[in-house]
Each structure stands twice: as C-alpha cells, then as structure tokens.
Amino acid sequence: MDSSAQYLMLSRREDFRDILEERRTSSDLSHALKSFTRMSSRASPPCSVSTLNKTVLESQHLHYIMQEVSKDTGEPLEAIREEAAGILEEMSQNLQLGYIRFLGFILSKVFKRLFRKINVNEEGLQRLQQAMQESPVVLMPNHRSYVDFLVLSYLLFTYDLSIPVIAAGIPLMGMQLIGEILRRSGAFFIRRSIGTDKLYWAVLSEYVKTILRKDFAPVEFYVEGLRSRTLKSLPPKLGMMHMVLEPFFKGEVYDISLVPISISYDRVVEESLLAYEILGVPKPKETTMGLLKARKVMDEDYGNMHVCFGHPLSVRDLAKGKVNRKQYNLIPRDLPMKPSESIHAFANTTAHLVLRLQQDNMVLSPWSLMATILMQNLGGINLKLLTKQTVWLKWLVLDFGALVDWPVQVADSEVMSSGLSLHHSVVRCEGDQVLLAEQKPQRGAAPEEAVFRRAVAVLMCASYRNQALHVLASPAMLSVALSLAAASSRADIYNLYAFLREMFYNEFIFIPDRTGQDFEEACSLLQKCGTVQIINQNIMVTDKGLSVTSFLTAAVEPFIDAYQVIFRYICSRSVQEFTEKQFISGIRTFTLNLILTGEVKSYDVLSSETQKNALASLVRLNALTKKKREEQTYFSPNKAAIGRTADILAGKIAPQARTYSRL
Amino acid sequence: MASSGHGSGRQEAADRRLRLIAGHLHPRIAASECKAEAAESDPVRAKTVPKRRQEVMKWNGWGYSDSRFLFNKKGQAEFTGRRYRLGGLIFPSLKDWFESTFGANLQHKSPPTAALNSSAITPPNLNEPFLQDLKSMGIPHSLEAEDRVFRAHGHCLHEIFALREGRFGRLPDMVVWPNCHDDVVKIVELACQHNACLIPYGGGTSVSSALECPPDEMRSIVSLDTSQMNHILWIDEKNLTAHVEAGIVGQELERLLNESGFCTGHEPDSMEFSTLGGWVATRASGMKKNIYGNIEDLVVHIKMVTPRGVVEKSCQVPRMSTGPDIHHFIMGSEGTLGVVTEVTLKIRPLPEYQKYGSVVFPNFEQGVACLREVAKQRCAPASIRLMDNAQFQFGHALKPQVSSIFTSFLDGLKKFYITKFKGFDTHRLCVATLLFEGDREKVLQHEKQVYDIAAKFGGLAAGEDNGQRGYMLTFVIAYLRDLGMDYYVIGESFETSVPWDRVLDLCRNVKERITRECKERGVQFPPMSTCRVTQTYDAGACVYFYFAFNYRGLADPVHVYEQVEHAAREEILANGGSLSHHHGAPKPMSDTCETTNQIAAYIQSHGLLRPRFLHLVVHDGVVDAKATEDDERLCRKRR
C-alpha cells in the first residue's frame, strides 16, 4: 500500500478542548505576557530576520536568475540586484515575539466576543510538536475566513510552539498599520498574479526555501490559494507547493512534514459578503477603515470554531517510489530547474491529499446538516420534518466517517433551535415552517432584482450545505451513476462514476489516480449502511436504500443542473471563441431569463465559482480548448463534445468504457 | 600502528617507515618454498605471506592472531600482542564509550565458535584432469579445508559474521599458489582447457563480496592465491618507476622501496594486508593521494592474464592517445576479467620530513567549508581528513592511559580553553587531522598556509597528538569491529564520492537515514552513525561512514544490517553521491553500475573466471570483444 493510502486510513477520532474557557477565567494580559519558550530542540538556534534576508539575497540561485534577467533586459546587474532587494523588502516578514504577544492580547478579546468556543485537538498539537523536532514543518490550513489568518499563530503561541511565518496576499499589506502588525506577526506578502515575472518568482521561492532549509520557523500557507467563497475546498494551487517540496527533493533537508489543518466554523464571520462575491459583486478592498467599520460584526454570535491539527505527512514517505531524486544530480543544485512530469504529478497529488485530509478532519455543525436538508426544500419545510431529516442525516454522515459537533445530552429539538437562532441571517421560522430569510425587494424593482435577492439567500444557505458536501460527494457520485446507468453491472456503474468524477473534479476535489479506490470506498460505504447490495458484479439499490440514494442525488443535483445550463449556453452561442469575462456575463443573463421563466431551479448556476469550475472541467475533458494570446485566455468550444457530455450527464448515452484496474 | 611522529631528515623518515611496518610479520615465518626464491636474479625479495595464512592470521576476524582488543578482568580495554605500538596499552575510556554509545554491556557476550571444525566442511568438488595437469607442472596447491575456508571470503560483515557462527557457504575447491606470471598463464590455460572456475585472491581484504563463491557454481572453483608473487622485479631510478609482481603486500612494498630510498606513497587503510594486484583490481585510493595520486595515477603499466591471452601495453609511458585506455578497463574489474600479474608503478624519493597536525572546528559545517577552501586553493597536505563529532568522541575514547598527572592536567587545560574560553560546544565541535610531507622548510610553510585558512573558518590548531590518533583509528577500526562482535555489536564502513555543494546535506541525510531505518527495523538502541571527509578533490570529496549497532533482540541481525546499509546507499545516490569512491561496487547494489555490467555482458563469452565475467581476445594489442547468447543469458540471470 502506498503511504498516501496509509495516511487516509489513520484514525479520525479526535478529542477537542475549548481554549477560550481558560481565557474567560484568567487574565488575558498574563496570557499575552506568559513566558514563551520555543520548544524545538533540533539544530542550531534560529537566525535573525536580517541574516535570513541576507542569505536569500546572496544565494547562488538568485544570483543566476539576476544574471539571466540582466542579460534578457539589458539592464545592469546592479539595478536588478536592487530590484530584487526591493521585492524582498516588500515581501519579507519581520516576526517579533512582542507583536505576537500584543496580538495575543487583542485576539483573546476578539475571539471571546465572536465565539462561544474555540475547540482544539490537543493530541494534534502534540503530534505537531513532535514533528517540529524532527523536520521543518509546513502548516497547511484551509481558508474560509479572515479569522483563519492569525488563529494558528495564536494557538501555537498559547501552546508554546514555534510561531509560523504566513504567506499572505499583498492586499493585506496595504492596510495601514494592520499590514505592519501582520508583518511583525510573521506574515510575508505575495503579489497576486505573478505571471512570468522571473525575478519575483526567484526571490519568493528562494525566500520560502531558505526559511525551510534553515528551519527558521514553520511555514504556513493556504494550498487553496485564496479564501473559499463557497466554503467548499478549492482546487489546489501548486506554486507554493513546489517551493516547499523542493528542499526535500534536493536533499537540503532530511524530510519535510506537511500538516493539514482543518478550521471549521459554525458561522462564518463574513457570511453575508460571500454570496455577493459569488454573484459577482466585487469584494470590498481590504482597508483599515473597512475593518473598523466592520466592528458591528463583533456584536454577533458566531458559535463554535474547531481547529483540528491532522497527522503530519512525511514528504519522504509520500515520495517513496514516486519521485526519483537522482534527477537532481546532473544539474548544479542552485540552477533553476523546471519540475519534471513526475515531480509535477507528485506535487499535484500531494496537494490534493492535503485537501482531502483537511476535509476529513472538518467538524460538521448541526447547522450545516440542516442547510443540506433545507437546500432540498427551498420552498420551506416543517420544523418537525426538518428535525427528523437532520437527525437522519447525522447518522448517515457519521456512518460515512464524518466528525459531527452534535452536543450530547441535549434534546435534538434544542440543538435545532439553537442552530436556527444562530443563523437568523439565513433562515427564519414562520410558525412551524422554516424558511430562507430573504430580503424583500423594494417595491417597483425589476424582476431581476427579486431573483438576485432570492439568489443571495439561497447561496448563503448553499455555502453551509457546502461545508458538509465533501462527506457526501463520492457516495453521491455513485448514487447518480446508479440512477443514470442502464444496467446494474459494476463495470457500467464504474464508468459513469469515473465520468462524473472527472466532470466534477474541481467542484468536489478528488485525489488524482484514485478513481478505483474511491469507487470501492463509495461502494462499501453504501453497502455498509444497507443502501446497495453487490451480487455477482452487479450493484443494486436495496428497497430501503432508495431514500438514501435519492437524497444523495438530490444533494448534488443543483450542480448537475447548473452544468447542464452552462453546456446549453455554450452550445447555443455562435461565437468561435470567448474569454472568461464574456462567458460569465453572458451566462448570467442567460440564466436569469431561465430562472425567471421557471425553467431552471438551481441557483448554483449563478455562482461564478461553479461557472469557472464547469469551464475547467470542459477543458479537462477536451471539450474546450484554451489558448493564450496577448495576456488573454480564450476558450473555443467543441460543441459536439459538449453535447455528448451533456447527454451522458442526462443519462441519454453511456460514457466511453474505461479500464477498471481494481475490479 | 601509527608512526612515531615527525622525524627529521631522510634517515629518520626511513626509520619511521621501517618501524611502521616492522614487527607486523611474525618472526617465525621462514622464507617460503617458492622455487623462484633460489634465483640469483631476484633484485628484491619481500617477506612472503605464508601459504598457510591461518597460522599467523585470524581465520574468522581481522588481522594477526595475536593482535586484538579485549576487555580485561578489570573491565578495561586492552590491545594484545607486540606487533603494534598499541600492544599492551590500556584504553581507560573505551569501555564507557562503548557501553554508552551502543547500550552494550560487558556481561552480554556473543563469542565466536572457538575453532574451525574441518569435518563440517563439504569435501572439495575436484576437477581431476585439471588437478593432474597442475601437479605435473609442479605448481603448489592445497585441498585442505582450512586453506579453502580462509579464501572463501573477504571482510564484509555478513562474511565474518557467518564465520564466527561456524557457518560456511560455497568454498573454493582448491587453492593454487603460482610463483610468477608464467605460472598464472599456465593455470588460466588449464582452467580454460578443463572448464574450471578461477577466483584471484590477493590480500583477502575485499569488502565488496568479490571473493564470495557463487553458491550455484557447478564447476570446480580454484582460488588463485597471488601471495607468492611478491618480488620487486626492478627499480628504474632514471624514470622513477618500479616493476613489481602483483601479489606483494602494501607494507612490504613500501618497506623494500624504503630500503632503496624510495616509496610509492600509496597507503590505503588496508595496506598491511592488501596487495598491489588488489589495488589495481578495485581502483584503490591511498590516504596520501594528494601528493602521490590514486592507483590510476600511479600505474604506468599492467600485465593481466585473461582466458583469451595476456593484455598489456607495448611501452611504459606517462600518457598515450591510442583509443580508450585499456588500464581503465582493468582497474575496478575486481578479478572478473583476468588475473593482474605484474604492475609498473611510479615511485618517489622518500620524503625528508613528515608532520602530523590537527585543527578543531566549532562545528562540522565550518570544517567542511575549510576543506573546500583548501581544495580550492589546491594546497591540501598529504592527507587532510575531517571527522564529525561522533567520530571525534570515538577517537577520544581510544586515548591510551596517560602516563603522568601532568599530561592529564594539560589535557584538562586544553579542553577548558576550547570549550570555555573559545565557546566550542563539545557536542558539536569536530576535528580535522592533517599529515604534511616533504622538505622540512616547505612543510613548515605549507603548514602555516593551511592553519591560516583554518583560522578563517574558526579552526584552532589542536596539536600533533590528536592528528596522529585520528589516523590510528583507521588502522585499528577493523580490530575494533571484532571486539564489538564479541558484545552483540555489528558494523561496517562504506564510502562515497560527492560534489562539494552536496557534502553537508549528504552527510546529514545519510546519518539520519541510518538512525531512522534502525529504529524502524527494531534495533533497540540508537546506532552509531558517523562520517568523515577523507579526501578532497577539485570538484568534490570522499566521505567515509561508520555504522554500527547493538543487535540484541534481533532475530536476523545481518539481514537488518544489510537492509539499513542498502537504504543508506540509496540515500547516498539520491543525494548525488556515488556508490563507492574506492571500496568497489558492493554486489547487492551493482545493478546500479549499469555500464560495467553492460560492457561485461557484451564482452563475456563463457563465464570461466567468476560468474560476473569475461574474456578478451587480443589481436596486436587491440581488444576484440564478442559476446554470445550464452553470456547474455548468464548476465541476465545474475541480475
């Protein structure tokens, strides 16, 4: 068995402890001023920030690149060197314990106001401490909220572990004062869309690698690249991934530990912004004034937050048998080297594995289960029925191996009402009926305005459904395959499953090259809960299992519908090629009309995230070709292929047969 | 074993050399019955290694029978015998070091089986026609079990471990002692004629399993012992070359040349026992290669007997451009292509002056940086080696009992100065040992240059004594391994060649890999995993690893050892190192040496010599190689 499979099978039972409890009973000031001893017995004492930066600037790698850039541009080397120094100055963190203490004090106050509990798995922290003593550590949290940004530093400070340096987007730096505070708390800033700026890439990668080589501090970065607006995992970005893996490949460190960290919220602080952003209303620019104005969010209750530190992954273990490190022997180590195909595949698989492990350790709130049910009853649902179905769903996801934060010794009805009241911004109760809380459009507004307001409400609810979606995704793909398949033969169903997995690859994040295993797992999950039975290479839904498969199918239906609308739209257009921008504005009008006529019920299609994912899927399936011209990306459709894809998705024709390695 | 330090003047240097070698051989060994001995023409004749080597040497361990480490009744370590300067000395701190490093205990002994039980040995599989013809030629031979056992192994851990347990694998079926090149030609012809298998045997110090008899070999295996071919045939003082028979042992070669005021300067760690032919066959490297070069730099001419004829060049010149150099095909072939019988080597006048030295660095990183700088400035002394901290501690444990309170007081002062005054951490500092050779004045000048460079990297001169003891470690390490094996500790060394920029990473990663692999495989106590940089080159360095562990509680310690070593070598390759710098490719890993195998597969015609190989056809000095299907099959099977 390869080691990634082993990591996926590690125990997921975690005990959490509320760290705010102590903060509520003892002084925040003494917490902030507590003695802090970095627990890391390894290697030599850490170097100073200025030594670190000097090492980066004087590195051979950077030297090579600067020479190259100087030759390309014709500018003198001295100028290039100054430019590099400028980039580094803009980028580099300036971690100071004093600021961590200061932040610790502020954050104690803020967190206590925002959250009821911050639950942490202490065992995970012990594993982390162990890992820190053995090799450089990369902390890889998911990113659902701005709150994520410093919570890890706060926790590590509280538990006497090395404070990480954190990769942050450059807009944060622009915030007056806050930018500087973040910098001194360990944030380093990366420009968005670096593109082909060779020098910038070189400075950044050398910076990250030097931190790891010197074991200056743990490196924290979001493998998703940015905050997920849908509260669903985003497909990983591989740039940083490559940077943190390379020191191992080149033998500069013995090993690197990747620690997946799952941060789950009962209620996300910026929830109301999310829906607007997804619908294409640009997010407000990060400014200090904006932050101050956002103070009113402090008066709200955001329930619990869970931080779960996963098992550290040893890159050495993962790379065993997958990466031949000798490929680095024939080129000077400081020369930049394009990652080979095997390296690229490894980085990609590893990033997906981390995402998957993040998902596995997410703690589901009762509310996100409710939201999942609500999404299938957008017209409103009786509270009793909602309770019954939510409890039913709780057992189902527990069967599927999810962690659920369902309070024990509390009546189910209480759990429900607590969830509903916490999310008064999303739902409201009218008598026994539970309905989405929708802002009424102003009188006389256009009908589009009403659709838009409805969409905001639905997508807000959808975000919370999305928090639980990863648990259901693979069995749901299987359920859809079962419903689409003409026959019950295992091979047919596998074909459809594999097709759907490819189709929704970016939507639900599957680990590449695990189709066979994932299929087996989904089968055994459904078999275990009596939903399907497998006899003689036939997979059949049992009578009592029908409710499960139809529920699972309904859970992903909005996405299937959304993709169908998108396929229809592309096929209906006569243009040879289009840009993403044109596509997004076009599809919006197209869908609005369909929703107004009642032909389409899915609001997910309005989500720009879904739209982009669908495009990416078509590119993966070779139904769209992507071309870059003059800094612009153009897509040209193969309408026949898109039509075929749509037909398969509608169950009209069967997908092309695949070889199934694990039958 | 180490010399008496720096003498001055030519005479003293020669004396030192003599003392270095003197007494290694048992006085009882009389001259052999070699028929060539009577010949008046012999210019120089070495003391011969006896045919019955087991009379002076251990049959199941390293070196001379009378020389070994033991823990005496008081629990103190002691070295027996009078051959070495260490003989009779007490090493007070070795026990503590041994117990704390390995978690070993003097109560827990793992002694070897006492004596060789000849009856347990399968009788030889004789090739009668071969034997008859051999007898008629009057070439000495033996069928005795003890002789056969002695030549069935090198000094790999698994070989010695099996001997200590009284286990024997496939043995050579007989031993032959040719007296000269012509004898070898006859033996090889006979082997071809009667389809016997030949394995050349020199000093028997191989650590690449090259002497192991293939267990499935059906033919009669003949061990060809070159020990009687040990003449220096001539010395050419004008061209500074010497023509020597390949069976001569390193220390004898040096002693004899020293008598004439010359030396080769080739001093591999095994020089007490290894032979000239063995050096050529393995691409050996000597400690003082910075002055004298490695074997490939020293060799001017090689004569090799192959199943298809004799391979040699037609002249003895410093360099030639006539196609690929056939020498480079022979060197490193490890007895698979033929038997090296005579070699012409460069010689040098004996150096006037020799001086040891040492430098302490605050850490290994600084030490490597210093060695790199020395290599860059091309001012490396005859030898410069850098031991890591663990090896420094090891060397320290081998300090003999001090004779006076004053010396120990002085030691205390030195330690105080380095750790307290200079702030060196005793758990991080490391030591470079140095050996300078040449004209007195130049040596002193050179010394200053090297110490100046060292100072730039935080190095402090730490005296001649430390330097000398560092070199001693390399000579006694094999005896120490036998001591360890008496107490459940097994270990071995391996080495690699690596570019400068990867030295530090490679050392760290390999040591770490060893430690972790041991843990994973159930080794109870952390292993000793240590390294030193032993040679510097323009483009890289040679790194030498020692690895040993306490195997109590393990069902199959040798298997665990081999798995860990395999992992360590894998790590070396992944970090840009080579499989070997001078030991030769270890057999289990030789699939990584694709080129040799492929060439071998192509050229081989019928695995007459040892299974790995081959036959050359010589036409007017041009090598013509033909492979048959049969060989291809053989080669595939072996992988």
Image (spheres, coloured by chain):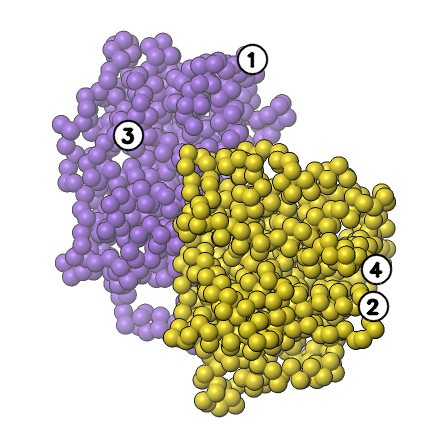
Chain colours: A yellow, B purple
Residue A568 screen position, x and y as percent: 75, 46
Residue at position x 73%, y 69% from top? A453
Dot 2: chain letter: A
Q: Which mark is residue A446?
A: 2
What residue is pinned by disc 1?
Answer: B620
Could you tell me which chain the residue with mark 3 belongs to?
B
The span from disc 4 to disc 1 (Cα, nearest Å) is 61 Å
Q: In the rendered view, tell whether residue A74 sits above or below residue A291.
A: above
Nearer the camera: disc 2 or disc 1: 2
The residue sitting at 54% across, 33% down in the picture is A659
Q: Which residue is mark 3?
A: B152
**Quadrant housing the C terminus of chain B:** top left
Q: Mark 1, residues whose alpha carbon is within 10 Å: few (<14), some, or many (≥20)? A: few
| Lower sequence index among marks 4 and 2 | 4
**Helix, strand or loop status at disc 3:** loop
The crowd level at tag 2 (other Cα within 10 Å; few <14, some 14-19, many 20+) is few
